[in-house]
Structure formats: structure tokens, C-alpha cells
Image (tube, rainbow, N blue to C red):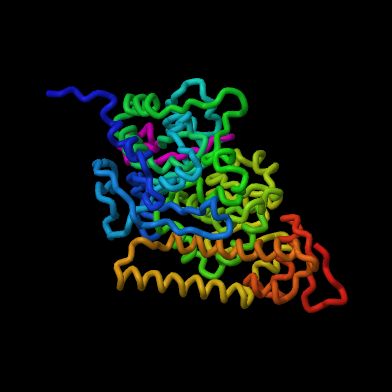
Amino acid sequence: MVEQSDRAPLLDWEEVPPAELAPAAPSPETEGSGHSGLSSYPTEGGVRADISQNASPARPNSVTAVSGESAHSPQKHSGPGGDASGTDKEGDCVFHGLTVRDRRITGWEEKDQIVAVFVVTFDTRSGNMIEWCLPQDVNLEGVEFKSMASGSHRISSDFIYFRKGCYFGLACFANMPVESELERGARMKSVGILSPSYTLLYRYMHFLENQVRHQLQCPGQYSPLEAFYEDKKAVLPLGGNGLVTACPTSALGPKVNRCMHPEMKITHPAGCMSQFIRFFGEQIMVLWKFALLRKRILIFSPPPVGVVCYRVYCCCCLANVSIPGMGISVPEFRPFFYINVADISALETEMSYVACTTEKIFEEKKELYDVYIDNQNVKTHRESLQPLLRLNSADREKYRKLCEQRQLLLYSQEVDGDCASNEEDLFILFFMEQNNRIFQTLSEVAGSADPTLSAEHVRAMGLDPQSDRGFLVDLLEIYGIDVMLVIDNPCCPSHS
């Protein structure tokens, strides 16, 4: 018999073989390779695949769709729902993280940087508590509540993205019935990790799911987690606060603006954005405006919270812009993912964010948010933002075009067998192109001899000259664009 060492589980974690991360001579069309590490928890639609969007910094005024041609790893991967093939069970193409082309352009490659691994348990007398962690001196205060969402006792499993200071975390939760009076018939645990960015956290979803089930069945056996940490632990730069962004600005060069970062920071399951838009329907156009205006957006939902964390990410993607320099002066649109009452003090200082919670008490804390979303109900308590809740004809036309493009895409996939294109690219690029059109027009008008924004300009941007006037005034003010807004009232122009 061959004795299995603690290193054996590493086969489950090595999602991308080193040789495939940096091929000797990558071509522009070559995609990165890797296998999804996604949750087995059923999301809306249950599609299992990964996606990468590519907005080339070398061509700021154009948008480049990611090719569906990808080389898949021949490795077998274990874990719930694991599939060793390059497609999911329904035949959807698998898309992967930061592509080889991205790396070639930027000259930068993100490394595994796990700064902590931990196990959280629910104790019937003490409540949520950290049972075990590495390194032992890491500050994990509050993680026991972030990685086990309020109300989780009513569900069997979940996954949670969250922020802890300058780090991002991913935890997998599971709830197992037990015949124990001391545990009141249920054993609940979460196994999670912390990293300076959230781009690569998805890789370890299967491993965390396996480990939380292992911890439920065999409490106290931490050797696989110890081996995992030794293999993946981060070497952080000396000095500073330890914050390492997913895609450092210095690596991309000065031409790339922060508005592009959200879509480069996470790899999520294919279907995430399309499910997001189908869930909200026409209301997506309302969220789009709030995102462009950098408002504080809070999403409430009872558990499970995993799919809601993806909605947080999708909200950030609505504001993507690829025009150099645009948006540098505005607050960064920051995803907080899951939050609880312990995050109140941190949110008090945030000027712009998107977050989700399972705690209804946040609805009463109106000073903490501008926009509150409960299920599909989008509302705001700020009188100046109330008009943005009403859809106008231009909003409905944009949504009609979005649906039309989606139908054409689905038709081409069915008839032509085209899996090089996907809904994720379509939605991401649709909103980026819309945003680029708006800011390109505003920049050209501001730089012209007559910096006056006419009704024709507004229509060319895909907006309604009358109904979107307030939105435009706020947009000009927030982004510091100096133009004269003259629409249907030339005798009383509004200078922004």
C-alpha cells in the first residue's frame, strides 16, 4: 500500500499547469488555460463555465471580444460537479481568467497569493467562532461573521465573497444534520481563504467545498488545509498596507483607467451576467445609471448569498469605460460583496460601493446607502435620484436592442454551432460601448470651439434629451466635464 501524503490534495488545487500559464511564444489569439473551480450550489440557471472579458488598453476606443478558442487542461479535477472536459455538461464553452493575450500586452501575470486559510464553526453557546487558522498571528477579526451569513442555518450550503480590510475572501459554508443534543441537531462550518485580490479565488471553490464537508464529517483534521497554505501562501511586498490589486495600474501603463478594473478583477461562471439581467429585466437600465453615477448600492437578499455576490460584481461591470483618463477623478466603484452589521463603520466613510447583505436592519440605515435593492425592487430615499427610477423611451430602446442582440446570438449558437461568442461578452461589451459612446461624445464637445451639448448630441449618446437631463447634469458634475447643456430651453442654459 502506498501511503498518501498531505501533499496529495494539491492535485485538486493546481487548476492551471505552470507550462500553460506562460507559453514560449503566445499568439494574440491564444487563450489562457485552466479549469473552473465553481460552486456546486445551484445558481439561477446552473451554468458551469468561466469567462474572460478583454478590453485592450492598446486600443482604448474600441472593444475587443474574447475568442472562444481555448486550450483546456488534460488534468482530472475532483470536487462536486467537477468535469475534466473543456465544456460543461450542457456543452457550453469554458472561458478562463486573465488570458495569455492580456498577459502579453501587460507584461504581468497574477500569482497565487493566499494570505490566510481558516475554519469557522457555529457554537451553540458562543455563536460564530474561528476554530482554526493559518498563519496563527493573522488578524481575522470579524471573519467569523463574514464567512457564515446571517440566516445560513436555514440552508444546507452556500459560498460567500467578502472584504476584510485590504483583502478579499471566499468561504464555503455547509450545514450537516447530526444526532447531537449539544449541537442541537446541526453542525455548521465554513472554510475560507483571504487574498489581496479576488481574481483567482474562484480557482479554489471546489477545494473549499470539499474541505468544509471534510470538516463536518471529521472535525479537527487540518492537514490538507496546512498543506494548501504552505503551497499557496503569499509573499507580500514589504512596507505599505499589504494591498496588492488584482491588476496593478503600473503594470498596465498610464493609459488604462480605473473604470476598467472591475471586469479584470474576477472570473465568474458563464451565465452570471445574463442571469443578472434576466432577473432585473428593464430595471437593469436604472441600475446602469446609478452605477455610472458612482452611487452607494446595497442589495438585500435572504440566504443563499453566493449568487447575490455575483450580482454585486455584475453591478460594477455596468460602469466599465475604456476611454483613457476618463473617470480618474471620480470615486472608485468598489465591490464590498457580503457585509453585515460589523461593516457599518467602514461603510460610513465610503463614497461609492456595491454590496449585499442578508440583514434587514440595513434598510433603516439610510445614511449608509443611496440605492437599496430588495429582490427586484430598486428604490432610493434621495429625492434628487427619484427621477432616475422611471424608465424612459431611450431606456426601453436600449433594453430592446440588448434583448435583440441576445436573440441573434442564441440563434447563431443554435444554427451555426457558434460557441466562440457568448452572452457574457455580449452584455459586458454592450454596456461598455454605451458608456464609451457617452463619454467620447462629452469629451469631443468639451474640447470643441463651442462646448455646447445639444439635443442631437444627447440622442447620439442613446439618451433622452428631456427625461435624461437630470442624469446628464449629475454625470457632468461627477466626472468634471465642462460643457454647456442646452436642451429645449436655449434662453436659460445650464452650465455644468
The image quadrant where one finds the C terminus is: bottom right
> What segment carries the magenta color?
166-189
| Residue 177 among those drawn in magenta | yes
Residue 59 x/y as whole percent: 55, 55
Quarter location, residue 442: bottom right
Closer to the camera in the image, 323 or 313: 323
Residue 468 x/y as whole percent: 69, 70
Closer to the camera in the image, 332 or 220: 332
Quarter location, residue 295: bottom right
Quarter location, residue 240: top right
Q: Is 354 situated left or right of 120 in this image?
A: right
Q: Is 453 situated left or right of 320 in this image?
A: right
- Name the main secondary structure of what is drawn in magenta: strand
Q: Can residue 368 be seen in this view?
A: no
Question: Height in image: 368 above or below 485?
Answer: above
Q: Total label count?
A: 0
Residue 429 x/y as whole percent: 51, 61
Question: Height in image: 183 above or below 90?
Answer: above
Q: Seen from this angle, which residue lies furthest top?
A: 137
Residue 234 x/y as whole percent: 46, 28
Residue beneath the point at 46% across and 71% down: 405
Question: Height in image: 399 above or below 226?
Answer: below
| Residue 377 among those drawn in magenta | no
The image quadrant where one finds the N terminus is: top left
Q: Is 88 situated left or right of 457 in this image?
A: left
Closer to the camera in the image, 41 or 239: 239
Q: Can residue 16 be seen in this view?
A: yes
